[in-house]
Structures are given as C-alpha cells and as structure tokens.
Image: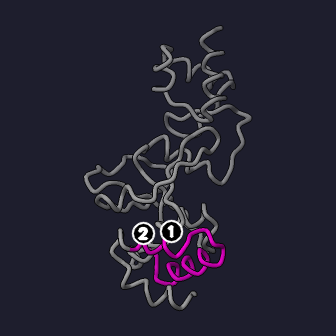
Amino acid sequence: MSRKQQILLLAKANGIIQAKDVEAAGISRTYLHEMQKEGLLEKISTGLYTLPEAPITENSTLIEIAKKIPHAVISLISALNYHELTTQLSPDIWLTVPKSSRKPKIKYPPINLTYVSDPAYSFGIQEYIINGVTVKIYNPAKTVADCFKFRSKVGIDVAIEALRNVRRTRKATIDEIMEAAKIDRVLKIMNPYMEATV
C-alpha cells in the first residue's frame, strides 16, 4: 500500500486529519500538501485536511475545534444548539477550558472562551463521535446550569429558555439539573425558575 493510500484510509477513518496523525503513522507531512494539490485531500483550515467528498455539516466547526483544541469542551450557546435546547444562534463556538489553560491561537472558527476550575470543568462532559472525530460537549443538565452561572454572558432569558426546553423535552431529569447546579454553585439562583417550570 502506498503512502498516499495510507493517508486516504486515515482520512476516511478519522474524518479530519492533521500532520501529527500522518506522522504518527510514520509518513512525512509533505504528502498532505502534495495530495491537496492533486485534489485527493481538501484543506478545510490551517493544518486540517479531509476527503473532498466528506459531508459538510453544521457540526463541521465543532470537529475543527475538537482537533485544534482537544481539551476544550463545547458549552453554553453551542452546546444548547447541539442539544436543540435554544432558538439562539451565534457566529462563535462557545468553549470551556480549564482555568490554567493558555488562550488558544486560532483565527477560525471564532471562539468565545470561558475559563473554569475543577470540578466545574470536568463535570458533565460527554463525548460524541461526529464524522469519526471525538467531540467533547457538556450534557444538557450541565449546559443549563452553566447558562445560569454565566447568565451575564449569555443572558438570563437564554438560561430560562434552556431550562424550560430541557424540562419539556426531558433531556435531563430534575436530579441531574440540581446536581449540575450544585457543582456550578447556582442552585439558589436556579431554584425559583425550576419551581416555575414544574
């Protein structure tokens, strides 16, 4: 099997590949540029390649983020959109990273960062496989609690809408929401709204 065939298999298996994926397989990164010129690969962003026929979905930017900033977790508005719990749209990808993280140096997609300490960072992370790429997204209960925690950032109306929608769709139980609210230290703030949505 040629080097190019190996790279094509990698791209098919992983959805999106980077130079480090190719080098981990013992192949020079120069093949990526060559294959892009030949039309065998498509460059979707700096250092990220995919097959030309790979489906472009609304989650493509989430995949890019997962590849570029592996420790970031999709949160707030972006997580609400993924879980179909809001009518809000945002041009930014909303991310949460550990407090000790450096600001990622990426130009695209635009990001809106939130820094938190443990256990707020690690609680409620779910991993989803999107086009062969593992993407970390907060679960619905944690996402709703986060919206109340960062209500000055997203707006209290967004937090209330998310709480109503998560209850209506039963994507999280009251116990799950309360546990997330305790982790985020917003249980007292959320209580009146939870009683109103019963």
The quarter of the picture where residue 13 lies is top right
Which span of residues is magenta-colored? 154-181
**Dot 2 surroundings within 10 Å: few (below 14), some, or many (20 or more)?**
many
- On the rendered structure, is 6 left or right of 155? right
Q: Are marks 1 and 2 in contact (CB under 8 Å)?
A: yes
Give the mark nearer the N terminus: 1 vs 2. Answer: 1
What residue is shown at x 62% (from left), y 45% (from top)?
130
Applied colour scheme: one colour
**Dot 1 surroundings within 10 Å: few (below 14), some, or many (20 or more)?**
many
What residue is shown at x 65% (from left), y 54% (from top)?
58
| Label drawn at residue 141 | 1
Pinpoint residue 163: horizontal percent, then vertical percent.
Answer: 54, 78
At label 2, the amino acid type is Ala
Pinpoint residue 120: horizontal percent, then vertical percent.
Answer: 35, 62
At label 1, the amino acid type is Ala
Q: Is residue 74 above or below residue 34?
A: below
What residue is shown at x 49% (from left), y 33% (from top)?
47
| Label drawn at residue 66 | none
Quadrant of the snapshot with the C terminus = bottom right
Q: Is residue 135 above or below residue 118?
A: above
Q: Is residue 145 above or below residue 24?
A: below
Q: Is residue 166 above or below residue 65?
A: below
The quarter of the picture where residue 81 lies is bottom right
In whole angstroms, how far apart are the C-alphas of marks 1 and 2? 6 Å
* Tag 2 secondary structure: helix
Q: Is residue 161 magenta?
A: yes
Query: For the view shown, which residue lies furthest in the right direction?
Result: 53
| Label drawn at residue 180 | 2
* Tag 1 secondary structure: helix
Pinpoint residue 136: horizontal percent, then vertical percent.
Answer: 49, 50
